[in-house]
Amino acid sequence: MKFQANRDVFSEAVSFAVKLLPQRTTLPILSGVLIETTDNGLQLSSFDYEVSAQTEIAAQVEEPGRVLVSGRLLAEIASKLPNAPVQFSTEESKIVVRAGSANFTLLSMPVEEYPSIPQVSGEAGLVPAEEFAEAVAQVGVAASRDDVTPVITGVQLEVGDNTLGLVATDRYRVAVREIDWDNGTTSGEPVTALVPARTLTEIGKTFGHSGNVSISITNRDDRELIAFTADRKTVTSLLIKGNFPPVRRLFPEQVDNYAVVNTAELIEATRRVALVLEREAALRYTFTADGLTLEAIGSEQAQASESIDALLTGQETVVSLKPQFLLDGLGAVHSEFVRISFTKTENPNKPGPVLITSQTSKDQAGADSYKYLLQPNLLLR
């Protein structure tokens, strides 16, 4: 095998191929990147039985072939090569990588033992890449990081005729966003896919500037797979098995009691007042006609409070919220103002969830469909 490729193009392709591989794989061979020559250049692939990544790049191929090499090592080398064409060749069980005066020799891995890369051929739909990346970032933050309950470590994708919904929860909060979905001429049954949040977050970052992203879901050999394709790159992922909790029903249809606050001011005030909090403690937020007061109490070491402007509609309300959970929701609201709505429960002593949505101005709701529902802590008495 022998080829020559542009350094930056080759480095970016190797980096993409290894990005989704875990730091430690169960089998050493799964840490490899498969490089194959094609009619038009090269195809680079990685696969760990759960996630695969595949990309094609242009290259001048002198001798066709197929080789498997340590992915992270090659990615490190490729990113630090001098600015010159990469010359790649195999000599028996060794791989030689040259660029300018730099010369590396690597051991190849047994390519015949490498598993076949999964191919997804189900019906595909298209989503705008920037909207998709934004939605993944907004919703993914609410997914659980506790592997004890795998079903809530994913983001549920809900395919409708013209929309793609994204939903995530960790039991303490729920995030939802809808974006446009183009399913071509077909109008099939609604489809859901539960994708690992970590994988989906990386996919969102990778394909964020790709125009449109093609998404297809398939069942093959009892393996449910989803594939994302854009810019000659494809990522496939196994779906999480299980039933995602029906969290959409937790969202109220209408809330009459709410406050509108400048998003940046609330973020800065929350970060300041939270400095004196002990870990896992909550902040008290008091909404009145005069504005919003934040208080950090309950610690003998230090206390803090701050007041900012807020426009309240309805009755005065006091809620206790974990600052980081609130900041996650505020960070996902891409508008100058934020609406914080207060829901009710049948128990007057137990506060209902707080609903966070975007707000274009003090008196106009935001145009996007992002919603973030946060369960308050019981107030300290």
Image: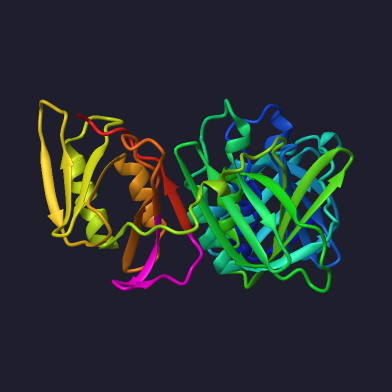
Corner quadrant of residue 94: top right
Q: Is residue 159 above or below residue 94?
A: below
Q: Where is residue 51 in the image (x, y as percent from the top left)?
A: 70, 43
Q: Which of 123 and 212 is in front in this view?
A: 123
Q: What colouring does the structure picture have?
A: rainbow
Q: Where is residue 146 in the image (x, y as percent from the top left)?
A: 52, 30
Q: Residue furthest right?
A: 221
Q: Nearer the viewer, residue 115 or 76?
A: 115
Corner quadrant of residue 159: bottom right
- Magenta segment includes 357: yes
Query: What span is colored magenta in the figure?
Result: 356-370
Residue drawn at the location 71% of the way across and 28% of the way down: 27
Q: Which of 168 and 206 is in front in this view?
A: 168
Q: Position of residue 329 (x, y in %)?
A: 39, 52
Q: In this view, does 56 lie to the left or right of 245?
A: right
Q: Nearer the viewer, residue 122 or 49?
A: 122
Q: In this view, does 279 lie to the left or right of 245?
A: left
Residue drawn at the location 72% of the way across and 36% of the way down: 241
